[in-house]
Image (cartoon, rainbow, N blue to C red):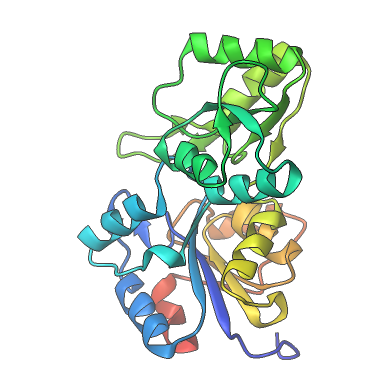
Amino acid sequence: MADRKPIESWLTDMDGVLIHEGVPIPGADAFIKKLRESGKPFLVLTNNSMYTPRDLHARLSRMGLDVPIENIWTSALATAKFLDDQRPGGSAYVIGEAGLTTALHDIGYILTDHEPDYVVLGETRTYSFEAMTKAVRLILGGARFICTNPDETGPSAEGPLPATGAVAALITQATGRKPYFAGKPNPLMMRTGLNAIGAHSETSAMIGDRMDTDVLAGMEAGMQTFLVLTGLTRPERVEDFPYRPSKIVDSIADLVDRV
């Protein structure tokens, strides 16, 4: 890291880094406050596509974390940006919540179950057999298969929940078609996020709690990477991966003085 350029912009995951099960992680408020005071470009990222940036802004505000709407980047936004680049003004059959449908509406997409260009699968707590059956038939009929993120499980106060990646696997088994995942660890999500704030990878850092999404995506996008131990990845698991973060720290509190 001694050969790296000074960090001029920051990207950080949300769950496991700034908050955990609806509670701010100690140091998160100081980190966000320091970022805002510094004037450095930054983004809070999440692979969860359920919520709009406005929803997440309100949710974080209730926890005492003041993150402007324009500093929130979701896998739904990354998916919409990808589709807008690939096929502007297209159509999609969507399984997901307001975060995803709003992002697609905002780029001018038509949401339909009649010969859509894409089937887009995102996070929801109400996956239905009817919707999955519709998705399978549309994909077999020629629709391209897109997913917001590959996470197989998500966190909750009661324990892990099935997430987008798990449902995608079911649809893949039924159709023989693998989806394109727009969210982490796809570095596309990082690059589109960096472009959104006018930042460059060689002077940016990614903070995350998962080796297989946050650290991998940051590394492949050319950024410095910081792994915090307040989320899913435990210290003893780091050696299980063929790549390493630039630095491992206990929590976001250890990075306040780096801003």
Report if residue 108 is visible in the image: yes
Residue shown at the point (32%, 48%) measured from the top left: 21
Q: Position of residue 221 (x, y in %)?
A: 73, 65
Vertical arrangement, residue 239 with respect to residue 47, above or below: below
Decide which of 162, 144 is in the foreground and name it. Answer: 144
In this image, 37 relative to 169: left or right? left
Decide which of 194, 116 is in the foreground and name it. Answer: 116
Vertical arrangement, residue 41 with respect to residue 210, above or below: below
Residue shown at the point (60%, 46%) measured from the top left: 80
Q: Position of residue 166 (x, y in %)?
A: 58, 27
Q: In the figure, residue 147 lies in which quadrant?
A: top right
In the picture, which quadrant includes the N terminus?
Answer: bottom right
Residue shown at the point (48%, 86%) measured from the top left: 259
Report if residue 20 is visible in the image: no
Q: Position of residue 104 (x, y in %)?
A: 54, 41
Residue shown at the point (25%, 62%) measured from the top left: 61
Q: In the figure, residue 223 lies in which quadrant?
A: bottom right
Q: Position of residue 79 (x, y in %)?
A: 61, 45
Q: How many callouts does the rendering have?
A: 0
